[in-house]
Amino acid sequence: VYAGQVHHISDPECATGIHIRLGDILAQRLDDSNRAREHYEAALEADERNAHVQDALEAVYIKTEQWESLVSLLLRKVEQTDELDTQKALVFRVASIFEDMVEDPEHAIEAFRMVLEFDGEDHQALDALDRLFMGLGRWPEYLEVLQQKAELAEDLDARKDVYFAIGQTYERELEDPI
């Protein structure tokens, strides 16, 4: 009954509340993720910062494997917060989706670089870029990441290991002994 009438309600707050309630019922009780998504998206359009709707949509997108929509939602959440740790965690999730679910290393690389824009010394992002560039054979970019890791190494042994990897890359992959 409400689903057919919600579009005729003139009060935006009331309509948003009904969309949320309908989305909850459809997602949780009726297991109808597609119709729930429609109502949650309508609610989010009216109230873009509503955490309940964002979380519910996130669950629906994961369940229905709508990765592009999930990435858009997570990036929207990044823009809505000023908390550095939260921003980084959200962008790491975006990178993981691109790398593991969509199998799109180029977009994963963009996401890990975004983490470095927030925190240029993030070891997890550097390790991920290291792994991706090496796997793709993108040696100049791989060497740049290794150089960053060498500069950030906290002890001499770690720095030596990174410089050794740099030397090996020049020798084996670029056929350019230093």
Image (cartoon, rainbow, N blue to C red):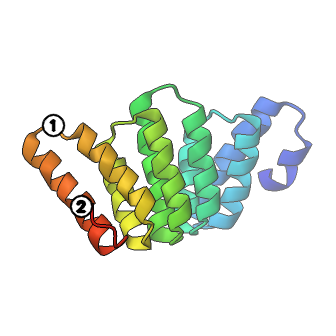
Disc 1 to disc 2, how far (Cα)? Answer: 20 Å
The quadrant in which the N terminus is found is bottom right
On residue 140, the disc is none
Across and down, in percent, residue 88 comes to: 43, 40
Q: Percent position (x, y) of residue 81? A: 53, 29
Residue 151 higher or lower than 142, as above or below: above
Q: Nearer the viewer, mark 1 or mark 2?
A: 2
SS at mark 1 in the image: loop
| Residue 38 horizontal side relative to residue 131, left or right | right
Q: Which residue is mark 2?
A: 167
**Dot 1, how many residues are within 10 Å of its Cα: few (below 14), some (14-19), or many (20+)?**
few
- Label 2 is placed on what type of residue? Gly
Which residue is denoted by mark 1 in the rendering? Answer: 154
Q: Residue furthest top?
A: 82
Left/right placement of residue 157 relative to residue 102 reads left
Say whether residue 140 is visible: yes
Residue drawn at the location 39% of the way across and 56% of the way down: 129
* Above/below status of 107 relative to 74: below
Q: Please identify the quadrant where the C terminus is shown.
A: bottom left
Q: Position of residue 32 (x, y in %)?
A: 63, 67
Kind of element beneath mark 2: helix
**Residue type at the position of mark 1:** Glu
Q: Is residue 34 left or right of residue 143?
A: right
- Of 27 and 70, nearer the camera is 70
What is the quadrant of residue 164 in the picture?
A: bottom left
